[in-house]
Structure formats: structure tokens, C-alpha cells
Image (tube, rainbow, N blue to C red):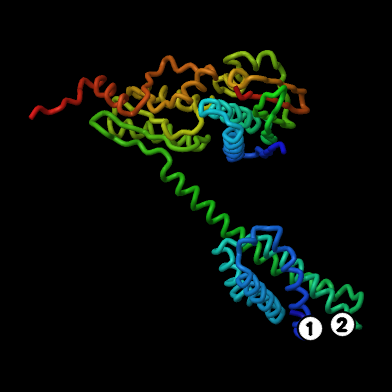
Amino acid sequence: MQVQTHVDIHSEWGIVAARQAGRKLAREIGFGSVDQARITTAISELARNIYLYANKGQIQIEEATSAGKRGIKIIATDQGPGIKEIRRVMEDGFTTSGGLGAGLPGVKRLMDDFDIDSELKVGTTITAIKWLR
Amino acid sequence: MNSVIKDMVLEHKEDITDSWLKEISKFRSDDMLQNISDKMYENTNLEFVNILILTVQKTNEELEHDELIQFVEKLIQIGWPLNYITRGLQEFRKACVEIISNREENSHNNLEFFKKIEDWIDDIVNLLVTQYSGSWENTVFLQKMALKELSAPLIPVFENISVMPLIGTIDTERAKLIMENLLEGVIEHRSQVVLIDITGVPVVDTMVAHHIIQASEAVRLVGAKCILVGIRPEIAQTIVNLGIDLGKFPTKSTLKKGIESALELTQREIVELKK
């Protein structure tokens, strides 16, 4: 059976909950401590983006399988304002909140597959996968 | 309390109790009550229903100092879930309405009668839920205070050298506290070098890094130097992956090395005594 965890983000504590759920599943799948740290950090970034820009949303964490590979899949969904310039948010150092601007490009580097889908005033869905090597 | 209901409830006390006990034992399996012994569960149920029936004789003011409250406080203390209370009361209402309307001819289809029962039970529900949530709010508040107390101490270790060990998740509120304590402490202890130890921080994401960078920048402005220590290997890798630039920042792997370099910065060193 596929393991799935769903965490609602509507406060900063949601970020912690999502992170812990992610770490737990990553450990169960068999990721090493460095990859566990990568995965938790990626979840932390995505959850924080939800909290910061959309106020609330969901993080879904599940096991992913493809062509004999196993991995962990993180899906971050919100019904927030959407991202105006997707190309620019993927550049290092671009920020609209006064942060470091390393969040999304950082998540892309931390994970293996990265997919972003956003529509203005409708919301954003980000899917990221890390494969077990 | 309305005397008509009171008489009816007291008259059919046994039937209500039986029907309620039957219902309540059904939903035991689907919640957190499984690991409670059968005997304990039965006794508590019996106590609960007896107290509930007695409340029909009491006014609202009397309820507040009642054994009902004591009973609920006991449940809270031993950690029974709130849904035991709410479902228990729902079933109790059903049992009352069903049994009384079956037995009493003149109460049949009498809206007034149902309303009376509703009012009676609703008052109890409100009272108990308030009691429960009050105790939770209190717990959460106390934990928050406890957390804040161990939040971000600045410890002077040598003259002019202080250490701030950070343990646990850093959220916005804590980040603010870190900044305040850091700056106040630096002035108070006249520190020249401050070591920020992040060994106990589970995740360093861009926000945490941002707060640390800001804090050290502020420390620089008041004339002291910041060294970041306790960067675990996996954290080092994620920081590089995230592309966070800590180039301007002196960092050391352990607190020990940090202290050595802090002593160096203040023209001192640790020497072993020759005997």
C-alpha cells in the first residue's frame, strides 16, 4: 500500500508538522541522513512559501515509484494569489518578501524532479520528487 | 429546571441509564478509549450517567460547582478525549427523548417538551466543552511560556566571549527573540565575539539562514563579531544546495573550534600547564 501523508498549513506549526511527516517517511523509504535533511529542508521551504504568500494550503507527502525506482514525492498546493513571473522566481536572489530569494531554486536543486504550476488568482501547485539511489 | 421533565426523567431513570450504557459501549472501539480497562470504562460510564441524571434537579448556577465539573476535571486529568463527553451527551439526549416519548402518552409530539430537553442538555454541553477547551488553552499557554524560557539564552563563557546555543525549530517569534537577546547580551556582557551554535537546529532553510545572517549583521553594527558554529555535515550540504551565501560569515564546525578562534581574535589562547 502506498503511504500518504497530508498536512494542512495554516500557521507556522503546520510547517513543523509537514517537516516531521516528511522526515519520517523519508527515513522509512530508506534515505540517508543527508538526503533526509535535503527533503525536510525542501518541505520546509515549500510549506513556508504557502504560509507566507497564500496563508493556507496543503502539503502532501507520498512514496513515489517509477521504473523500479523508489522515491518520495512532495506536492504543495495552495489557493493563493499565484506566481506572476515563474521564470523569475526560479532565479537565485529574486524575492518579493525581503527574504534571501533562494527558496524555489534551492528546492529544485535539493530535489531531483521539480514541477511548478501556477495560475494568477487561482493558486499554485508544486510537485517535487527525490529518488532513492 | 422544568419540573415536568424532572419528574419524567427521574421516573424513567433506569431505562435511560440502560439505553445509554448500551449505546456508549458501542463506540468505544473507534476512538482512543481502547487502552482503558473494561472495568474502568464501565465505572466511569456509570458515574457519568448518574451525574447527568442528577443535573436535571439543579439550576444553572448550581451546575457550575457541581460534581459534574469535578467529574470532567478528573477525565481531563487522566486524558480522556473530548469526544467521549460530546458523544456521551448526544447519546444521552437521544436516550432521554426516545424513552420518555415512548412511555409518556401526553408528551408525544410535544415540541415544547423536546425543546426543554434540548435546553437542558445544551447547557451541559456548553459547560463541559468550555471546561475542556479552557484546560487545553491553559496547557498550550504554559507550554508556550516554558518554550519561551528556554528560547535563546546568551551565555558569557570568557571575558568578551559569549555563546548563544540554539536548540529546536526557529519560527518568526523565536527569530525576533534571538535578535533581541543577542544585541542586549552583547552590550550587557561587552562581548567582542559571539558564537552562535546551531547544533540543535533540526532544519536550516532559507528563512532560518536569513534570520541568522540578519542577526550577525546587527551584531556587527554594535561592534562585535559573530561566528557560526555547529554546522553538521548534512546541514552544510543543504545550505550549499539552497545556494545560501555565508561567505561573509566566519563559520566553524564545532563550538570548541569556535572558542579557540574567538580567543585568537581577542589575543588569548588556552595553554596546558607544565607540572
Looking at the rendered structure, the kind of residue marked 2 is: Arg
**In which chain is the residue bearing label 2?**
B
**Which residue, given by chain and number where applicable, does mark 2 sit on?**
B103
Q: Depth check: B242 or B30 in front?
A: B30
At mark 2, the secondary structure is: helix
The quarter of the picture where the C terminus of chain B appears is top left
Q: Is residue B159 visible?
A: yes
Q: Is residue B207 visible?
A: no
Q: Residue at x 20, y 23 (%)?
A: B269
Measuring from the top left, give residue A30's x and y in whole percent: 58, 31
Q: Depth check: A34 or B215 in front?
A: A34
At mark 1, the secondary structure is: loop
Q: Residue at x 41, y 38 (%)?
A: B152
Q: Are marks 2 and 1 in contact (CB under 8 Å)?
A: yes
Measuring from the top left, give residue A27's x and y in whole percent: 57, 34
In this picture, residue B178 sits left or right of residue A91: left
**Which residue, given by chain and number where applicable, does mark 1 sit on?**
B12
Q: Reply above or below: B13 against B131.
A: below
Do callouts 2 and 1 point to residues on the same chain?
A: yes
